[in-house]
Structure formats: C-alpha cells, structure tokens
Image (cartoon, helix red, strand yellow):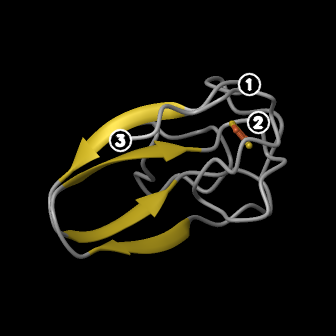
Amino acid sequence: MSRNNTDAGMPIAITLEPGTYYRCTCGGSNTLPFCDGHHSGQERPIRFEIEERRKVYLCSCGKTQEPPFCDQTCGVALPQD
Ligand code: FES
C-alpha cells in the first residue's frame, strides 16, 4: 500500500454493511478510503468482503501484514469490540 495516501498514518474506523469493497491504495480516489477507479501510479485497490455488518479498522500506514485491515503494526492499540 502506498505511503502517499492522504489519509495515511492512522487506522480508519468504519462500520460496513455486508458486501464487496475495494480499498484505495494509491491515494488518488475522491471517495477515500475506497477506490473510485482512479488508480494513479502502479497501485491497485485491495478487494475484500464483509460477511455481516461490523466495525473494521482499515490500515492507512501501509505497514500492515493483513491488508486492508490494521494489524496494529502502526503502534495504535485498537479497541477490543
Ligand atoms: S494503520 Fe497500518 S497497521 Fe495500523
């Protein structure tokens, strides 16, 4: 994931309904944190599925080993829901 994202550095807490999502990784989207088809540079969105409505924490630092989700590599302690 690009470190040039304009929302980089902190996990993004968001509640998502069931469905398919595409996490922007290039930072060029007008609908961050989701892809809108810009794909600036070589970056491509990360497709992921949500099976049931839940709160997620999307990585925006680019260091996670579990994209698109924050794995706390950034140093932010996520709340235990
Ligand atoms: S925001 Fe990237 S690991 Fe937490």
Q: Which mark is residue 61?
A: 2
Is 68 situated left or right of 30 in this image? right
Mark 2 CB within 8 Å of ligand 1: yes
Mark 1 CB within 8 Å of ligand 1: yes
Q: Which mark is residue 81?
A: 3
Q: How crowded is mark 3: few (under 14 residues within 10 Å), some or many (20 or more)?
A: few
Q: Where is residue 36 in the image (x, y as percent from the top left)?
A: 40, 51
Q: Residues within 10 Å of mark 1 (few under 14, many from 20)?
A: some
Seen at 35% across and 41% down, the residue is 81
Q: Which of marks 3 and 1 is in front?
A: 3
Q: Residue type at mark 3: give it.
A: Asp
Q: Dot 2 lies on which element?
A: loop
User: To which residue does mark 1 refer?
Assistant: 9
Q: Dot 1 lies on which element?
A: loop
Q: How far apart are marks 2 and 3 (CA)?
A: 22 Å
Q: Residue 70 carries which label?
A: none
